[in-house]
Amino acid sequence: MSKRSEKIAEAIHGTVSTLLSRGLNDPRIGFVTITAVEVIEDLSLARIYFTVIGDEAVKSASEAGLNSAKGFIRKELGRTLTIRHIPEIIFKYDHSQEYGNRIDSILREIGSKHDGDDSEHR
């Protein structure tokens, strides 16, 4: 990623996070956190990664709400970004936190089994 696209990604991250903290007028959007933003080199597309607290239904509803708010979000980005063309937005659920939690629980399980084995050998 170029320096310019990195700066645009940071600005998009901040603006969208602020919009979400103020609350969008869509009850489907749950407690959403923006985890990352990737902007492609030509600045025509921004992938916005998010997580949400809740089950699969909450995730789906939040994603639908975010997608329906794309027009409003792009308009707000147009006010804050100093670029001629605002990138198209794609919202993607960020599975890395779930993946990290799963690895963490597996490591804890292995660690507790290992601790149990140590006590048998003493």
Image (spheres, rainbow, N blue to C red):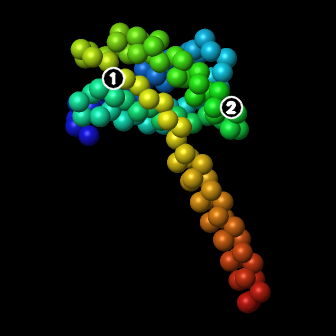
**Residue in front for this viewpoint, 92 or 5:** 92
In this view, the residue in front, 40 or 108, is: 40
Which residue carries the number 2 mark? 58
Residue 39, horizontal then vertical, whole percent: 32, 32
Residue in the picture at 58% in, 28% down:
63
The 10 Å Cα crowd at callout 1, few under 14, some 14 to 19, many 20 or more, is: many
- What distance separates the C-alpha of mark 1 from that of mark 2? 27 Å
Residue marked by disc 1? 87
**What element does badge 1 sit on?**
loop
- Judged left or right of residue 22, residue 9 is left
Is residue 31 visible from the viewing direction of this image?
no
Type of amino acid at the residue the image marks with label 1: Pro
The residue sitting at 72% across, 82% down in the picture is 117
**Residue 72: percent from left, percent from top:** 47, 12
Mark closest to the chain's N terminus, 1 or 2: 2
Badge 2 element: helix
Answer yes or no: is residue 102 visible. Answer: yes
Residue 81 left/right relative to 102: left
Quadrant housing residue 105: bottom right
47 vs 28: above or below? below
Residue located 58% across and 16% down the image: 23
